[in-house]
Amino acid sequence: MKDRKKFSHYSNNKLLIFIFLVLNLISCGVSRSVHHLPDIQSYTLEIPEVHKINDSTFTYHQNYFTKNKQHLWELYIHGNPLQLGYNRGALTKDLMWRQEEIFFSKVETFVPSKFKQKLLSGFLKWYNRKMYLNVREDYQAELYGLSRYSSDKYDFIAPPYLRSLYLHGAHDIGHALQDLAMVGCTSLAVWNENTEDGDLLIGRNFDFYVGDDFAQNKLVEFVRPEEGIPYMSVSWPGMIGVVSGMNKEGITVTINAGKSKIPLTAKTPISLVTREILQYAHTIDEAIQIAKKRKVFVSESILVGSAADRTAVIIETSPKNFGVYESVNTSKLFCTNHFQSEAYKDDKRNQKQIAESHSQYRYEKLQELLQFNEKLNPEKMAGILREKSGLKNKNIGYGNEKAINQLLAHHAVIFSPEKKLVWVSSNPYQLGEFVCYDLNTIFSDQRMKNGEMAASQFNIAKDPFVESQEFQDYEMYKQMSSEINDAIHDKKKDILLTDDFINYYQSLNPELWEVYYQAGQYYYKRKEYPKAKDQFEKALKKEITTVPDKARVEKNLRKTLNKL
């Protein structure tokens, strides 16, 4: 459901623009990047011989990969950059193939034509032609090692090494080409008088959605690089970048997309900037210096927490600007999907983002929640990340992107940097049990003393909502939403839906504006204009996600009225 909405912006007009760019520019400056391979001669390498203990546990020397009882995959690897890549690839190969299949099947769904797929492949090669010039050599070596275990199924898109590199810019590329935030992430930091023990506490929802299957195999990884600081991160198999993570020194990073101008070429993927921060920064100042020297190609907020500094800041970076936002006279910091620093005060795109998107609404919801949740602890932070209501506790429908919990998160994470503790959510979304990990133990000889990675005595219980009828209804709503989308976009008009079907569908999530908007679209397509009018009017009485969404509903209502 949500993935269709996200990718619907990938319109025919934009595809034509892509084709035009490919035909006119593909020959310019692509050859060198396509044939580039990193220099790996300086690294020693031992080809991993993986030992399979059971269907969910694999080892190679002191590297291991296992699934815990909450169904989170846990990976521990160490070595030089090339060895890290090989170790990661050898241990996670099957899941990496699966993850790549899920991701590229989405591409095949929306670009089914083999001819257009070839054009898209050519476009990606042109668009990414400068990426390798902006990625550290050691990370390229790691990606090369990882790519030795890639499937050959998608070589038509790009050869394994290039494909691994491109996938690390998938978040950035989707964000840039669609000129919108692919995700509506929410993060916050509190300390001093705002926490139970005065320590810094950070929470985040990573609302990156490529379908439910993509989020099934969450990966919690612990990396001990030959150079730099050991760190943990939460992502998916095949990823060496960081979207949520903390290092052994208590530096944390989380990323939130901002409004971005469409650039003409890819540069440094943001997940590799945050990886570098975790691997090499001990303080906020060091994190800022690392971020400042990297050329990015989208607008992004990086919330950085620091045990040493006992505070957090937001680094706001974009292709042509850079700012740092610090809270003033308060011990709390909120981050949604707009910039707050002085550097972006007059930025028109950012002003439009605040005025028209759901970012400001979620920001105000965080402010409201902190008024009623004084002195946070990890359990209370989990409650905030799971919050489904709108402002003033209004029921805005399940899955509304104005909610802190949009019921689509790939993961949620809670960090306690001074204690070096981290809690990672398990499926579904951020509703499952939060599993606790102690970096002090994991990056020591004691990490597997009791047979498990987690410090499970500190786990946070699953949300009772997951056992409710409302949640079951929401899951059914998602399934039926796909059926209605198919009917709306059915060119042959062969898919017929009964009024009873639509009424039942709406009863599953009655406060969400989209259930009425979709019904209106379906009835309009069937030329049942009185019914369409009624549905569009109902949608306008609900909490619509963004200003453009509301304008779209109003436009469809006007079209319908003209037909009556």
Image (spheres, grey):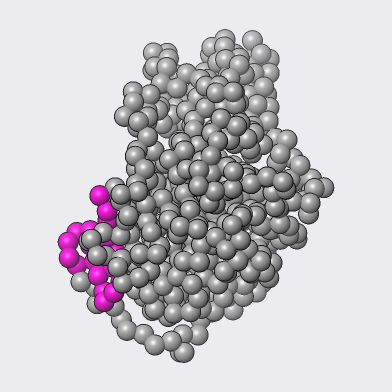
Which region is colored magenta? Answer: 52-69
Q: Position of residue 538 (x, y in %)?
A: 57, 15
Side (left or right) of 73 relative to 205: left
226, 561: nearer the viewer: 226
Q: Main secondary structure of the magenta part?
A: strand
Q: State whether residue 31 appears in this view.
A: no
Q: Classify 315 as above or below 287.
A: above
Side (left or right) of 382 relative to 303: left
Q: Is the C terminus in the top left, top right, bottom left or bottom right quadrant?
A: top right
Residue lying at 36% horizontally and 43% vertically, measured from the top left: 460
Q: State whether residue 510 appears in this view.
A: yes
Q: Position of residue 266 (x, y in %)?
A: 63, 64
Q: Classify 545 as above or below 309.
A: above
Residue lying at 60% horizontally and 66% vertically, measured from the top left: 283
194, 243: nearer the viewer: 194
Q: Position of residue 200 (x, y in %)?
A: 54, 52
Residue farthest along the right direction in this orientation: 346
Side (left or right) of 256 relative to 159: right
Residue lying at 74% horizontally and 51% vertically, measured from the top left: 341
Q: Is 54 included in the stretch rendered in magenta? A: yes
Query: Image quadrant of residue 358?
Result: top right
101, 53: nearer the viewer: 53
150, 303: nearer the viewer: 303
Q: Classify 5 as above or below 310.
A: above
Total count of labels = 0
Q: Is the N terminus in the top left, top right, bottom left or bottom right quadrant?
A: top left
Q: Classify 176 as above or below 142.
A: above
Q: Position of residue 201 (x, y in %)?
A: 52, 49
Q: Is 173 included in the stretch rendered in magenta? A: no
Residue lying at 44% horizontally and 47% vertically, measured from the top left: 411
